[in-house]
Each structure stands twice: as C-alpha cells, then as structure tokens.
Image (cartoon, rainbow, N blue to C red):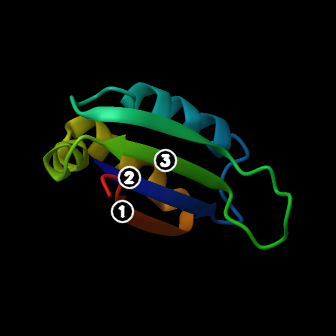
Amino acid sequence: MLRQITMVRFKDDAPKNVVDDIGAGFRDLVGVVPGIHRFEFGPNLALMDDTFHYALVIDFESEEAWQAYQEHPKHVDFANAFTPYIENAARAHYDLSG
C-alpha cells in the first residue's frame, strides 16, 4: 500500500472561497478510481506560523492505483482548475506495507 501526503500553500491573491472550493473538488474525487483506501483532506488549523494552508492524505492499494488516479480525467481537470491559485505544494509518497 502506498500513501501520498500533499500540502498546499495558496497564493496571497487567491480568492477567499478557494479553501471551500478545493474541499468540494476533493469530495468529488473520493473513490474516482478503484484501489483508494483512504482519502482525507482539510484546511490547516494554523496552530503555527509559516505552515501550508491545506493538506491531503490518500492511501492507494498500489502504484498502479496511484497512476490511475493521476491520469483520471476528473483529477486532471481538478488539478488544472486549482493550479493557478497554488503558490507551492509539497508531496511525499511512502510504502505502508513494511
């Protein structure tokens, strides 16, 4: 099993509703491909300074399931819609099996 953690920092001029909109977009992606076992996301609680604005954790059955998610048209459309508002993103992938 493969876990992907993504953290996003929005641009200063991103629309105020971007956090709500990205959450709605993620809800539409839950279960978009077989092999997703966990799909959690939410805005940062801002308990510390200089943190990212949003986080996402997805567990995939396999690298093939991850690849299918990356290439799925709904995911591609989602990424294209929100990329203009993102200042930067950090991602990590790791194996949960051992």
Classed neighbour count for the residue bearing mark 1: other residues with Cα under 10 Å, few (<14), some (14–19), many (≥20): few
Residue depicted at 64% across the width and 65% down the height: 11
Say which amino acid is labelled 3: Val
Evaluate if marks 2 and 1 touch, with contact meaning CB atoms under 8 Å apart: yes
Return the residue at label 3. Answer: 57
Alpha-carbon span between mark 2 and mark 1:
5 Å
Q: Is 58 or 71 nearer to us in this picture?
A: 58
**Image coords of residue 12 (percent x, y):** 71, 66
First in residue order: circle 1 vs circle 3:
3
Residue depicted at 77% across the width and 73% down the height: 50
Q: Is residue 20 left or right of residue 3?
A: right
Q: Secondary structure at mark 2?
A: strand
Classed neighbour count for the residue bearing mark 3: other residues with Cα under 10 Å, few (<14), some (14–19), many (≥20): some
Say which amino acid is labelled 2: Arg
Alpha-carbon span between mark 3 and mark 2:
7 Å
Q: Is 66 or 16 nearer to us in this picture?
A: 66
Evaluate if marks 3 and 2 touch, with contact meaning CB atoms under 8 Å apart: yes
Q: Is residue 71 left or right of residue 3?
A: left
**For the residues carrying marks 1 and 3, which lies nearer the camera in this image?**
1
Q: Is 98 or 73 nearer to us in this picture?
A: 98
Q: Is residue 85 above or below residue 88?
A: above
Return the residue at label 1. Answer: 94
Q: Is residue 49 left or right of residue 86?
A: right
Residue 32, quarter of picture:
top left
Q: Secondary structure at mark 3?
A: strand
**Image coords of residue 33 (percent x, y):** 23, 31
Return the residue at label 2. Answer: 3
Q: Secondary structure at mark 1?
A: strand
